Image (cartoon, helix red, strand yellow):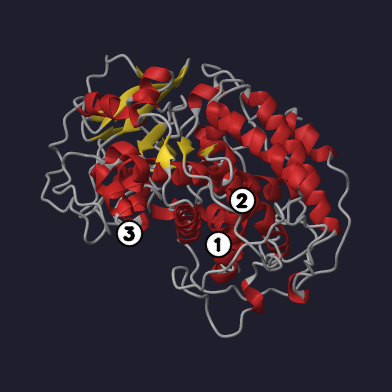
């Protein structure tokens, strides 16, 4: 069918340099016989923007291969990306439409399946199901106190910096950017460190496409254990709030919401921190300011989110029927992937001014835009500021062009970020840690603005264990029994993986949610239903 662009649809956000007149029919058509371009391997990782430039010559969207045997259409045009993201009636998120997976053309063990296949969470749902699941997530995120979050990030950052400050050298990816989000989500989710380590290992495997089935199984078993712990010991944390939400999530739904949240809070967050540090240490526009005593961290974050967003390609959609997309034929049920990185660097954008410009698509757009973008940006800004405060003479240990990027179709991630610096002393006496990031204890209406918070000193423990921390929760937010999910729906094709880390933390609530009345606590039956579902029974 021919799909006319909506009148005035796909309009860039106010203030965006993409505001220019463009007729609906002037997007160039993609020759249907073009061989798909691989988006995996070291060549793509080394210079993805060169690949995007070649794909743009084919039109607003072009055929790509995400992994061997897994084909998709990649959207590289800014306006076209907005049309996909903002028209859910044409481009659905429910991956049960993915024809190639259902009919066996894509094997269930293909490394991209965990990132793309259906599961009952807010990122892979449409209509009423999406509204219900997303509301549970946004309401729970709204209960986080940004003031407490800033303090916890600063204390955790100081703890990590103290571990390598006296050495004069470090890998900022492995020793800092990767560990800091782990500490933060352990606190937000009330997660014991040993379970947090296993989750990070699992998510790293999925994002890298390495032994994805093992990574799936590791995340699933760890989340089962963590949810069981929270049903026994609810606290002032995201998992307990999700359990107590009036949406009454089933156990299966709980697992999948946590996959979205944890996936978005670890891998993309570490990449945002590391990519911003790389830019600050290698680009003369920023390095000169740093040498002069200024730290343009917010400017660097804007630059990274435009040019090297931590999730470069994602926003997977499935046309609900055959579509003529600006001259590009799109088949119903075949994946359409939005390249946030390519759309952000679309030559049609009339200016290259990026400082202070938030019209980029790094947080996605439309119904699935990231509701936690303020918290994610806060964590990254505090992490970078604290490191540069403590180690102002930091410099790269190798030339910037020798840094290696990790292969993968979805992320933009370094393998390491080696630096050197004059050894520095520890941060000194430190106060007791904050164990509760809940906004429910904060006096006054509404949340505190995230960028106007007092700074805190650090504490010397690596991270408080939830078993050691005083996490009484709030009496109005005790965990409630999960909904009975009922019989499993009939599925065609191979059973889907139960996992899907989110490329963008799936509009964000701006005020603290009203706590619902809690129901009586109840013990769930053991997790046999999940094992049966995993086997497709």
Q: Are marks 1 and 2 in contact (CB under 8 Å)?
A: no
- Residue 400 position in % (x across, y down): 35, 31
Gap in Å between the C-alphas at discs 1 and 2? 35 Å
Q: Nearer the viewer, residue 98 or 59?
A: 59
Label located before the other in sequence (3 or 1) = 1
Asked if 66 appears above or below 440 in the picture, the reply is above
Residue beneath disc 3: 294
Q: Residue at x 35, y 46 (%)?
A: 280
Q: Relative to residue 27, is residue 504 drawn left or right?
A: right
Q: Where does residue 64 sit, x and y in percent of width and height? A: 36, 22
Q: Could you tell me if residue 263 is visible in this image?
A: no
Instruction: Tell which tag, 3 or 1, sits nearer the viewer.
Output: 3
Question: Is 185 on the left or on the right of 227, as rendered?
Answer: left
Q: Is residue 125 above or below residue 143?
A: above
Picture quadrant where residue 521 is located: bottom right
Q: Foreground mark, 1 or 2?
A: 2
Residue lying furthest bottom:
444
Mark 1 or mark 2: which comes first in sequence?
1
Q: Position of residue 113 (x, y in %)?
A: 56, 28
Q: Is residue 389 visible?
A: yes
Q: Position of residue 292 (x, y in %)?
A: 29, 56
Q: Which mark is residue 162?
A: 2
The first of marks 3 and 2 along the sequence is 2
* Gap in angstroms between the C-alphas marked 3 and 1: 35 Å
Quarter of the image with the N terminus is: top left
Compared to residue 467, the image places residue 415 above or below, namely: above
Q: Residue at x 88, y 44 (%)?
A: 526
Q: Verify CB contact (< 8 Å) between mark 3 and mark 2.
A: no
Badge 3 crowding class, 10 Å Cα cut-off, few under 14, some 14 to 19, many 20 or more, is few
The label on residue 138 is 1
């Amino acid at each position: 069918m021919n799909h006319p662009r909506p009148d005035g649809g796909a309009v860039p956000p106010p203030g965006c340099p993409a505001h220019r007149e463009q007729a609906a029919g002037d997007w160039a058509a993609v020759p249907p016989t073009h061989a798909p371009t691989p988006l995996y391997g070291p060549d793509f990782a080394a210079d993805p923007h060169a690949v995007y430039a070649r794909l743009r010559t084919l039109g607003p969207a072009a055929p790509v291969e995400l992994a061997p045997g897994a084909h998709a259409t990649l959207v590289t045009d800014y306006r076209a990306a907005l049309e996909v993201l903002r028209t859910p009636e044409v481009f659905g998120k429910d991956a049960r439409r993915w024809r190639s997976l259902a009919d066996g053309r894509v094997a269930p063990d293909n490394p991209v399946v965990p990132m793309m296949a259906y599961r009952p969470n807010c990122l892979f749902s449409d209509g009423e199901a999406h509204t219900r699941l997303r509301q549970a997530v946004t309401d729970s995120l709204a209960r986080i106190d940004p003031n407490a979050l800033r303090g916890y990030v600063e204390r955790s950052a100081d703890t990590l910096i103290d571990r390598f400050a006296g050495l004069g050298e470090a890998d900022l990816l492995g020793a800092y950017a990767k560990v800091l989000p782990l500490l933060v989500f352990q606190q937000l989710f009330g997660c014991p460190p040993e379970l947090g380590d296993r989750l990070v290992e699992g998510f790293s495997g999925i994002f890298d496409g390495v032994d994805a089935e093992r990574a799936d199984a590791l995340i699933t078993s760890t989340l089962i254990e963590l949810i069981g712990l929270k049903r026994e010991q609810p606290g002032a944390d995201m998992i307990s709030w999700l359990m107590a939400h009036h949406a009454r999530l089933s156990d299966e739904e709980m697992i999948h919401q946590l996959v979205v949240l944890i996936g978005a809070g670890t891998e993309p967050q570490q990449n945002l921190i590391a990519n911003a540090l790389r830019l600050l240490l290698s680009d003369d526009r920023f390095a000169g300011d740093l040498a002069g005593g200024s730290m343009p961290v917010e400017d660097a974050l804007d630059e990274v989110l435009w040019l090297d967003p931590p999730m470069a390609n994602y926003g997977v959609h499935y046309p609900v029927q055959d579509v003529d997309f600006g001259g590009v034929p799109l088949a119903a049920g075949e994946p359409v992937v939005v390249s946030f990185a390519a759309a952000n660097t679309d030559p049609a954008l009339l200016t290259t001014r990026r400082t202070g410009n938030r019209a980029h698509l790094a947080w996605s757009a439309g119904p699935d835009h990231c509701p936690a973008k303020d918290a994610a940006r806060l964590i990254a800004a505090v992490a970078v500021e604290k490191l540069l405060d403590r180690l102002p003479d930091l410099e790269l240990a190798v030339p910037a062009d020798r840094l290696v990027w990790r292969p993968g179709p979805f992320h933009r991630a370094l393998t390491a970020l080696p630096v050197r610096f004059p050894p520095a002393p520890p941060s000194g006496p430190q106060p007791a840690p904050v164990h509760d990031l809940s906004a429910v204890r904060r006096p006054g209406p509404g949340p505190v603005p995230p960028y106007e918070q007092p700074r805190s000193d650090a504490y010397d423990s690596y991270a408080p264990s939830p078993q050691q921390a005083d996490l009484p929760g709030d009496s109005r937010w005790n965990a409630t029994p999960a909904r009975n999910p009922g019989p499993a729906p009939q599925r065609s094709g191979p059973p889907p993986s139960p996992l899907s880390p989110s490329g963008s933390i799936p509009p964000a609530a701006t005020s603290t949610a009203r706590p619902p009345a809690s129901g009586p606590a109840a013990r769930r039956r053991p997790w046999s239903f999940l094992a049966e579902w995993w086997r497709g029974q």
